[in-house]
Image (cartoon, helix red, strand yellow):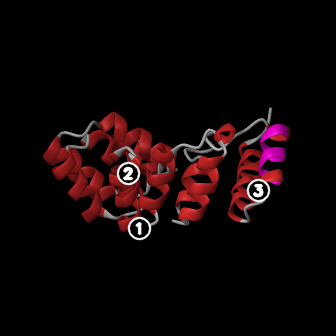
Amino acid sequence: MRTQEELKSIQQRLVDAVKSKNMPEVMQLISDAGINLNTEVCGFTACHYIGRFADDSLRVLLQANSELDFNIDRYARGAAEAGHRAYAEQLRTQRGADVNRIAPGAALGGHRAYAEELRTQQDVDEDRIARGAAFGGHRAYAEQLRTQHGASVHWIARGAALGDHRDYAE
């Protein structure tokens, strides 16, 4: 059994290999390590991290290799978290990325206006957005969603715990 630190290191090597478009290394890491682009390590996947770059050539590369099991929703969540709003919208409207993954990503990254726009215009579940906000340490926003829109304290606590915000999770 690998430690969280070992898994994080493997996941980072996987992200770096994708970023450098070294597909033989990507395939070797997946084969040797037994993790893939969708393996969650501390709440994040490699797809999410790669999405933060908002490099469409990486999306095209990953989608072209079906054996990689690329997840557009997790990728778009990463783009939204990093503040690449226009790109996240392109992924949502043109590539079918799930708004229920994008909005929490925006909240996680502290992009409240975008998360609110999606919440109000796309009817995204407040619980998911509040969890993202809590995960990212954006307590005031998570609390606003709880008190004004009925977001679940359980979802918020889980997000806070995943983000290592223990004082808020308790």
Q: Earlier in the sequence, mark 2 or mark 3?
A: 3
Q: Residue at x 22, y 44 (%)?
A: 146
- Percent across and percent down for residue 68 are 67, 41
Mark 3 Cα shell of 10 Å, populated few (<14), some (14-19), many (≥20): some
Q: Which residue is tagged 2?
A: 102
Residue range corresponding to the magenta coloring: 25-31
> On residue 46, which mark appears?
none
- Percent across and percent down for residue 60 are 58, 56
Q: Tell me if residue 133 can be seen.
A: no
Numbered disc 1: secondary structure: loop
Q: Tell me if residue 9 can be seen.
A: yes
- Percent across and percent down for residue 98 are 37, 43
- The three-letter code of the residue at mark 2 reads Ile
- Percent across and percent down for residue 120 are 16, 51
- The three-letter code of the residue at mark 3 reads Arg
Q: Residue at x 74, y 45 (%)?
A: 7
- The three-letter code of the residue at mark 1 reads Gly
Q: Which residue is tagged 3?
A: 13
> On residue 83, which mark appears?
1
Q: Earlier in the sequence, mark 2 or mark 1?
A: 1
Numbered disc 2: secondary structure: helix
Q: Earlier in the sequence, mark 1 or mark 3?
A: 3
Q: Main secondary structure of the magenta part?
A: helix
**Foreground residue, 134 or 61?**
61
Q: Are marks 2 and 1 in contact (CB under 8 Å)?
A: no
Q: State the separation of the CA atoms marked 2 and 3.
A: 25 Å
**Foreground residue, 87 or 95?**
95
Q: Are marks 2 and 3 in contact (CB under 8 Å)?
A: no
Q: Is residue 154 above or below residue 5?
A: above
